[in-house]
Image (spheres, coloured by chain):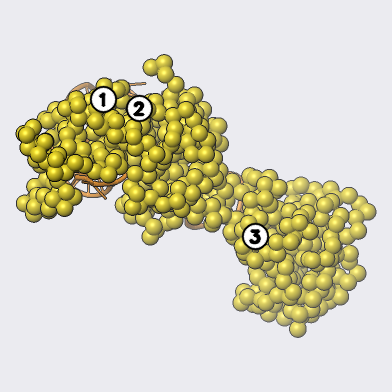
Chain colours: A yellow, B orange
Amino acid sequence: MSQTPRLRFAPSPTGPLHIGGARTALYNWAAARALGGKFLLRIEDTDVARSTKASLDNILEALSWLGLHWDEGPGRGGEHGPYFQSERLALYARHGEELVRRGAAYPCFCTPEEVDAMRAAQEARGARTMYDRRCRNLSEAERQARLARTPRPSLRFALPLDRVVRVHDLCKGEVEVNTAELDDWVMLRPDGMPLYNFACVVDDHAMRITHVVRGEEHFLNGIKQILCFEAMGWPAPAYAHIPLILGKDGRKLSKREAAVAVLEYRDRGFPADAVFNYIALLGWSYSGDQDVFSRDEMVARFRIADIGKAGSKFDEEKFLWMSGDYIRRMSLERVLEEAAPHLVRGGIPGGALHSHRDWLRNVLACLQERVRVYSELPDKMRFLFQDGIALDEAARRNLDKEPGARAWLRAYAEHLRQVALPPSYPGPRGACDTAVRLPVSKYEPHAAPTGLPCATPVDLEHDARAFAERLGVKFGAFVHPVRAALTGTTAGFGLFDTLFLLGREQALARLLAAAG
RNA sequence: GUCCCGUUCGUCUAGCCCGGCCUAGGACAUCACCCUUUCACGGUGGCGACAGGGGUUCGAAUCCCCUACGGGACGCCA
């Protein structure tokens, strides 16, 4: 076993890359990295009717987004290409013939209709459905006669009868299967298109694949493939058949309960790193007490044998938590960059990204620990861009809770005229935003330079406390109506960060409007 | 139906291979409290599991058997 470890992800482009496929790809990728080998991508597009360009693009995009970069494959080339099975037909034909010569494969003249009928009859009898091998037992004369009539038959693998195959599955362990459980599977269609098991064997060999990590549904295919490798006289790779991802109800993950396409999570505003991390955790764990880890950390510890043997349920709550955790740990510049498309889609003026970058960065700083996905951002910052604000019900109640509240607001607005608030968006804010870093925390004393053209959030708070005292109002009571007037809601980030970011014109107008 | 695999807190899991360190650890969720101008974040604490039954053993979550339940496969799909 001195050969370079080579692993592959081999999706068929018949739909968008879903969570389960992504996890399979991820484990193959991680194993390749952990073993110091190569990770390749091979496209199994032999089902012409169902393969689409859109699916292919989706898969490529999703893998790239997740950072699962392949060393060989579409767009990257490599010595063992082409990496699309539909472009390797001559190879399959040649090896098919070879197997016929060796007596390990035979032409089958049955039509799909005949096979379907056979299956239906077996089903009706309650028997196991299996090809009855009628073409395997044809006499040589009969075979030649049929060949004359049907020059292009399909090709079936002549399965060794009644043999026990023992495999050491890297995930499942030792398993024995009697070939009586299997039937003579079709290797090649009459039109020369290979079927899964055959194309897989030919390509895994041609591409020097050493380890195959794939879903448990392929376990019996693994047995068929091992037998095929054997018939070809080739060494088979090591297999690991891993359990499937289940939905909340314990059944196969379905679209009903969660988004299944990887790119849907991107579009909902999950950071790629968080998706990578969460998917990795579905059936594998970094350690007993650490759930959040980087790609490098994972690679350093990953071993195929450690993949869990029981199916795991997909828990969107934990996924959301993890997404928020990643966003919180990210640099502001990165948040700004990654959130940008979501802001624009959410109706935030795209121009602000350029004209008010510093201001926006401050806004995001205040929101960073308050969202779980980027797409929650627009709704939480929209009030900063509006001219005036409508109050929700809870906010309205806060205006009426204290009898004098409206009067305080009017007085506060008047008072604020004397205070150097930065201009409201889209006015120019300049130094106010570059020099002041939000959010202001009482744990980290504010160190804004003096001589700023505007009051900082800390200044504003000192000022407001003094103002409330002069008014004879408890600060806590004062602050709620102000928030309601400024933001239209009762929730949000620090009030004086809010006031600072909202700016002069809007603050005064909203205070006055709420005062009635 | 037949064959294969699995089963630790509600969920993801550590521990299991190499029995004792397990009064079973962590995380999400949940509850309480603290922090606090709200919401979050953060902190502290609580609730909460070895599917059931038999063995083996001085001792079993860990080894063996049975049962139950769950999943997968049985395509000219992959």
| SS state under label 2 | helix
Instruction: State which chain disc 2 sits on.
Output: A
Look at the image and tell me whether residue A226 can be seen: no
Mark 1, secondary structure of its residue: helix
Q: Which numbered tag is attached to residue A441? A: none
Please indicate whether residue A93 sits to the left or right of residue A392 in the image: left
Marks 2 and 3 close (CB-CB < 8 Å)? no
- Residue hosting label 1: A232
Q: Amino acid at mark 1?
A: Met
Image coords of residue A256 (percent x, y): 38, 60
Query: Which residue is the site of mark 2?
Result: A205
Task: Point out the frontmost of discs 2 and 3.
Answer: 2
Between A438 and A44, the residue placed more toward the observer is A44
Residue identified by numbered label 3 = A343
Q: Looking at the picture, does residue B28 appear above or below residue A482?
A: above
> Label 2 sits on what residue type?
His
For badge 3, the amino acid type reads Leu
Label 3, secondary structure: give it.
helix
Quadrant the N terminus of chain A occupies: top left
Tally of numbered tags = 3
Where residue B26 appears, x then y in whole percent?
49, 40
